[in-house]
Image (tube, helix red, strand yellow):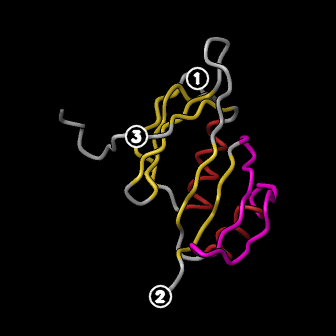
């Protein structure tokens, strides 16, 4: 099996409202790079892809045929405190406060599109 270059074995595919807004959230909070954006109309996305590090997230606007399907995701970042604060500043709501865990510093937010993010910085050794 040959997976196309730049893709992984498993990639989340989110069906959400306001995919254009989600693209902005991903860029502002996680520094995502837009890879692909196929519009359905001026304000709707039929299919889009962003990269965060080496991970691809695919997403599209919900339709009558394809209902909303948000996800819960765990993401490693350089600085959980800064990223968590940025997420809240651009419209996410706090789900779980930041705390030191055995695996690193972690806290949860729900983005404005219904996805849950467990924002985590790995423990320093």
What residue does disc 3 label?
10
Say whether disc 3 or disc 1 marks the residue closer to the N-terminus.
3
Query: Disc number at residue 125?
Result: 2
Q: Which residue lies at the image location 53% right of the left edge and 75% below the top edge? A: 122
Can you give x and y, in whole percent of width and height, for residue 109 in the image?
74, 57
Where disc 3 sits, the SS reads loop
Q: Circle 1: is it few (<14), some (14-19), or many (20+) Cα within 10 Å?
A: few
The image quarter containing residue 54 is bottom left
**Which mark is nearer the camera, 3 or 2?**
2
Q: Are marks 3 and 1 in contact (CB under 8 Å)?
A: no
Q: Circle 2: is it few (<14), some (14-19), or many (20+) Cα within 10 Å?
A: few
Q: Circle 3: is it few (<14), some (14-19), or many (20+) Cα within 10 Å?
A: few
Nearer the observer, 22 or 102: 102
**Which mark is nearer the camera, 3 or 1?**
3
Whole-angstrom CA distance, mark 2 to mark 1, is 49 Å
Q: Which residue lies at the image location 74% right of the left edge and 51% below the top edge? A: 110
Q: Which residue lies at the image location 43% right of the left edge and 51% below the top edge? A: 51
**Which residue, as the protein is rendered here, is positioned at the far left?**
1
- Which SS type dominates the magenta stretch? strand
Say whether disc 2 or disc 1 marks the residue closer to the N-terminus.
1
Say whether disc 3 or disc 2 marks the residue closer to the N-terminus.
3
The image quarter containing residue 114 is top right
């Amino acid at each position: 099996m040959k997976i196309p270059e730049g893709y992984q074995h498993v990639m989340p595919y989110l069906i959400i409202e306001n995919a254009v807004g989600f693209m902005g959230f991903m860029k502002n909070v996680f520094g995502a790079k837009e890879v692909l954006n196929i519009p359905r109309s001026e304000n709707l996305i039929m299919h889009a892809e962003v990269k965060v590090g080496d991970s691809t997230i695919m997403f599209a606007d919900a339709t009558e045929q394809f209902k909303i399907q948000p996800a819960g995701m765990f993401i490693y970042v350089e600085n959980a405190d800064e990223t968590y604060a940025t997420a809240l500043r651009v419209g996410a709501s706090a789900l779980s406060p930041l705390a030191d865990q055995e695996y690193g510093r972690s806290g949860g937010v729900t983005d404005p599109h219904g996805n849950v993010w467990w924002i985590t910085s790995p423990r320093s050794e």
